[in-house]
Amino acid sequence: MCCRHILRLGLILIVFSVANQATYTPLSVYIGEEAVLSCGHDPGNSLIVLNWIVELTDQPQCTISYDTEDNKTQNNCSKRIKLDNLSLHIFDSKPIDDGFYRCEISDPTGVFSMTFTLQVLVQPSLILELNSDGHLECLALGGNPAANISWSPEPQYGNTTEKRMSNMTWATVSTYTKENISVSNMTCVISHPTFAEDKFMTMNDTDRSIPLWVVLATVIFIISTIILGWLIFWQRSNIRKCLRVDKPNTASVNQGRDNAQNTEEVEPYASFTQKINTIYNSTPQLSKSDKIYWTVDNNS
């Protein structure tokens, strides 16, 4: 047992002595994919110690190790990084996973080391516009790694800056500084590992960026119009009832007009009848004792 511990200590010292001699193997995956890093040496059942040393950008070093003597795995890295046999699995890859991953395997025959450089690819969003100074500005935002931007023709007038964002993606901005140019003659050329070929962007003289407030006002107007139309359609029966209450009753008005007209037509007859009745009532009444004589003309 003592000899085994001495052997383990010697192997660990050898691991650290050869760490700087490891070659780098580049590896890239797209954001959200699973990255699998496998050591090139398989010791089989003779494995003594397995170490994965992870050095990420702007983060402290962490280690995932497996010791066959204790049969235990120690992991002080991200919970998204798991050990499966000798391979390292990184689930749901993110730009913060960019860095160096070194595998160290110890067995009775020696120490084997392999180092990977992992890069998580994110495709940038591209914008070509005129800035507040009237200069052409080409932007590649949210990409990983940073995009490469150049101008055609006369690339020497391009002023390009790169800035790493809080989510570990890059914002690349290139401004064409030459004065008095025709924007239609200028082309922004963007290259990135996520592009199958370079992207070319050209702005016409009539092209202008639409202000954000115009876009927001248009969207609000359209949404308000849709909501108002829907409310009118949904409440159309109530609106009709309100209109009926406010609108005069046409049938009643027409009936009143007909009654007035009928009254006018009946009034002459009523007046005539009233006169006849008056005359009739003014005729002297004859008593039963009164005699009426008829004279007959014999000559007729």
Image (cartoon, rainbow, N blue to C red):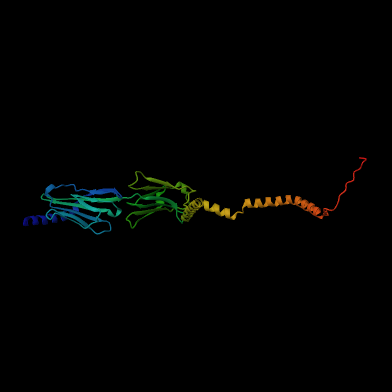
Residue at (55, 53) in percent of width and height: 241
Residue 109 as seen in the image, left or right of residue 205: left
- Quarter the N terminus occupies: bottom left
Q: Position of residue 137 (x, y in %)?
A: 42, 52
Query: Is 12 on the left-hand or right-hand side of 199?
Result: left
Residue 7, located in which quarter of the rendered image?
Answer: bottom left
Query: Which quadrant is home to the C terminus?
Result: top right
Left or right of residue 101, residue 136 in this image: right
In the rendered image, the residue lying farthest to the right is 299
The total number of labels drawn is 0
Q: Residue furthest left?
A: 2
* Residue 220 rendering spot, x and y as whole percentages: 48, 54
Spot the residue most to the bottom: 60
Of residue 186 and residue 43, the one placed in the foreground of this image is 43
User: Residue 167: percent from the left, percent from the top?
Assistant: 33, 56
- Pick whichever, 17 or 82, lies toward us: 82
Locate residue 136, reporting x and y percent: 44, 52
- Judged from this view, the residue extending furthest toward the top is 300
Could you say which is closer to the camera, residue 276 or residue 88? 276
